[in-house]
Image (tube, helix red, strand yellow):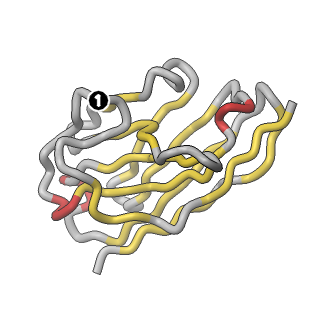
Amino acid sequence: QVQLVESGGGSVQVGGSLRLSCTISADNFGAACMGWMRQAPGEEREGVAAIDSDDDANYADAVKGRFTISKDNVKKTLYLQMNNLKPEDTAMYYCAAEAGLAGYGISRRGGYCHQDYGYWGQGTQVTVSS
């Protein structure tokens, strides 16, 4: 059973930084495409960043240049470093892994893998205040 557990959310002022972590219990962690999505109140969930087995990454336009996705295959942990945070970054952030963990790679669409996400964490709240 694949389990995803996020941590690292919190409240920060505009311009501040946070690093989210997500531990994923999967035997083939290193082969899978995984990413971060977020959902603000009243909004649809949207992709933020994704990374594949080759460490190729994609980003939503709204976060390019400010957020960095990375992973540690030994610790089986996915990260999202968020810098220069803005109020519009306020949302619940979810880590996710592609269904089947088959390693189909990242999509051309920022924040998504080729394969739909099939595993989700419980979410961690990020609040940016001015």
> What residue sits right under mark 1 in the picture?
109
Q: Residues within 10 Å of mark 1 (few under 14, many from 20)?
A: some
Residue found at the far front of this picture: 42
Could you tell me residue 68's position as x and y percent?
49, 32
Could you tell me residue 82's position as x and y percent?
61, 35
Instruction: Look at the image and tell me in which quarter the C terminus lies.
Output: top right
Q: Is residue 49 depicted above or below 118 in this figure?
A: above
Q: Is residue 35 left or right of residue 108?
A: right
Question: Which residue is at 80% across, 41% downward?
Answer: 12
> In the rendered image, which quarter is residue 85 located in?
top right
Q: Is residue 54 depicted above or below 11 in this figure?
A: above
> Regarding mark 1 in the picture, which secondary structure is present there?
loop
Instruction: Look at the image and tell me in which quarter the N terminus lies.
Output: bottom left
Residue found at the far right of this picture: 130
Q: Is residue 73 left or right of residue 61?
A: left
Could you tell me residue 21's position as x and y percent?
54, 54
Residue found at the far bottom of this picture: 1
Query: Residue 40 or 72: which is nearer the viewer?
Result: 40
Q: Is residue 40 left or right of residue 72?
A: right
Query: Residue 129 or 73: which is nearer the viewer?
Result: 129
- The amino acid type of the residue labelled 1 equals Arg
Query: Residue 10 or 44: which is nearer the viewer?
Result: 44
Question: Which residue is at 39% across, 51% downward?
Answer: 72
Question: Which residue is at 31% across, 40% downward?
Answer: 112
Could you tell me residue 46's position as x and y percent?
45, 41
Q: Could you tell me how many numbered marks the image carries?
A: 1
